[in-house]
Amino acid sequence: MNWSLFFDLTVSGLTLGSLYALIALGYSLVYGILKLLNFAHGDVYMIGAFLGWYALHALGGPMNPTFTGAVVLLLMFVVAMLGCGVLGVAIERFAYRPLRNAPRIAPLISALGVSIFLQNSALLIFGASFRDYNTFDLIGVKTYNIGSLFFSVPQLLTVAAAIALMVALTLFVARSRLGKAMRSTSFDREAASMMGIDVDRVISVTFFIGSALAGAAGVMFALVFGQIYHFMGFIAGLKGFTAAVIGGIGSIPGAMIGGLIVGLAESYATGYLPQGSTFQNLYVFALLILVILIRPSGLFGRAAITKV
Amino acid sequence: MEERPDTPRIGVDEWVASVEGKRERYTGWRGAVLERWERLPVAARVLVFALPAAVFPVLSSQGNVFRYGLFTLVYALLALGLNIVVGFAGLLDLGYIAFFGCGAYMYAILASPQFGYHWQAEAAIPVVIIVTALIGLLVGLPSRRLFGDYLAILTLFFGQAFVIFVNNANRISFPFVGHTDLTGGSNGIANIDPFNFFGFKIDTTMKQYYLLLISVALVLVLLAFVNESRTGRAWRALREDPLAAEVMSIPVNRLKLSAFVFGAAVAGFTGAIYGTIATAALPGDYDVGLLITIYAIMILGGFGSIMGIVVGAIIVSSVPELLRSSANARPLFYGAILLAILVKIRPWPRLAAQLAGLTAFGFAVHAIAAAAYPRLVHGESIGSGGFTRFLDHWMLFPKDAVKIADVAYILMIAAIVMYPQLGRLWRAVLLPPLLYLVMFVWENLLLVHIGGATRLILLGAMLVALMNIRPQGLFGTATVEIV
């Protein structure tokens, strides 16, 4: 067996996987509370990548940045996360909240509308061409290695930042008052509101957190792969949702593990399966079907009991 | 929370309330028209649409028939098929366009120089329909265990997988056969034969138009009968409440599958027709864009409403064509804004004040800008005529509009999101500036990109707005949500 290929694939799979996990968390949080598939989530991720780009260029661009590299990177993340968070809250206010008592299909269609709107707004403003991040000068092109395990700085950064964000999220949900409110709202919205929890506020916070995570993932993607374009949210959103479903939608550890599984599967498929680089998405699709057939509630999900 | 008209009162049985609501809808002149309409036999209802459509090519030019007629009918046929899956059975199928693509590719394989087969239409069409239906069965099988959103994501992925497959299937080596160019990759399959029914070739636009019209009429009649049948009723029961339907011993899984397969068959058939019209099967034709268009048609018309879909198809296929030129788009845009103001703002003194305020605000902004920042008024407006000359003195047209317009666009979205959060007084005061901002963005940014992104932006905004105002669509009936 070719170990260096295997290690390369594992590193890129873990990188991809952490991106998918961050996107999946947004889907999972929102789904857990509203039982809503937020189709616009992938496009929020795309907007995050573009916000990062604007922040980078507002700070002098990759060639002669105003601050040192680390500060610029941090500011890019802050801008993208805050911007996306606000965008997510606005989307919820405008497109989902008025439909909370409508038939189930209405918010889905509304979400589709938001997705089209965001995608084409991006096309209108950013144009149809690819934008380069060119952050290699900022963070360097050097690769490091542990034995035959090679990785670049953006890859390491992505995995580390994703893990940090996930730990923060887990602590927030498990320990803080608001996190407790989120858990109870997701368990039973009506009962939670009767217990004096401001459900609207909890939902807004959930959208803020989910969208901010997607924004961070957008910047990470751009740092690793270098190029962004207005349609990048679609496939990423699809994979993120796949990850959420595989892990068990509504479950936070499930979204993380699901993201890693999808990322690694995609990476290994590219390397080992016939015509993998062309058909990697088909293999991920096959994995999704397999999981749904064997365990419809996902790895960490509990089978829902329908109450009448 | 504001109480919606169709929310049942406390202490009233929901079913009774819904029936009462239905009766309530049938009052006034609208009720009278609706009641007449309901009493018409199916054939007569179909004729109401078919007759004008049959006369249309005689009155119009060849180009118009091709541009508006063919596409309207293809869209209508597709939306009718989708309506079975989503409107009747309530399954959110986002891979529907893939079945359409399957139909087109299947026919292209059977009747084009790609493999040298040139099948007659009477043999090829049944094969296409059966194979597409079988693929629908395969995709639908997992849906037995899925509901709602899971099915949506699975089918969306299937649609994407289809596009990836046909884009790359020219390089696959199959076992036994070896290397085969199945779909022509990104170049697609060209030179598809026209339909050839026992030697009668459907090779002109006119013949294709009438073939489509007959197909639409047939499907309409078929659906009207299915709608009244046992299966149709069972589908609707399934849509309203799968659990209750199952308790009533309705075979839920079988019905889901049959709806899925039925929809796939209609899409496959439409695909074959589309293949002959376009004379080529290209992967890009079967992507998300078309899916959204078809969904827009079905949503606009109303879920489960067959006639609504025909109207939706006419609107969705002709409005974007009209929007292609700025000469048409401008009156549509200002007309829509005016209409919204007329409907929303009452009584009339308030309306007059708002309109006067808007006009005055425009002139004031223009005068200030001309005095202080002449760069802001030196640009050119699009078009000519009296209205354009008025705009030149009223609206700002900056010299290099791109950057300013981009910022204004983002500001506009933020303003529109914030606006409903304001108090009443502020809303009244800030309406003219908001409208002015919207018009500024329209003139300087949206109108410039009218052929591209603008149309889809408007489509997306329309979907969100429609769901907010009327979730059941224009012609759909409101369903009573069970708590």
Image (cartoon, helix red, strand yellow):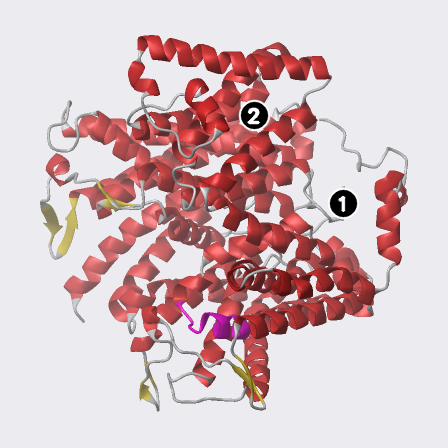
Quadrant in the picture for the C terminus of chain B:
top right
Q: Residue at x 83, y 42 (%)?
A: B30
Amino acid type indicated by mark 1: Ala
Q: In the picture shown, does residue A208 fall above or below B308?
A: above
Magenta span: predominant SS is helix
Q: Which residue is mark 1?
A: B478
Q: Which numbered disc covers residue A135?
A: none
Q: Residue at x 29, y 18 (%)?
A: B375
Q: Residue furthest left?
A: A142
Q: Quadrant of residue A184?
A: top right
Q: Which residues are magenta?
A: B271-282
Is residue A15 part of the magenta span, yes or no?
A: no
Could you tell me the amino acid type at mark 2? Arg
Q: Is residue B77 above or below residue B311?
A: below
Q: Which residue does the numbered mark 2 point to in the structure image?
A: A201
Asked if both marks, 2 and 1, belong to the same chain, the answer given is: no
**Mark nearer the viewer, 2 or 1:** 1
Task: Give the camera-side residue of B12 and A180.
Answer: B12
Disc 1: CA contacts within 10 A as few (<14), some (14-19) or many (>=20): some
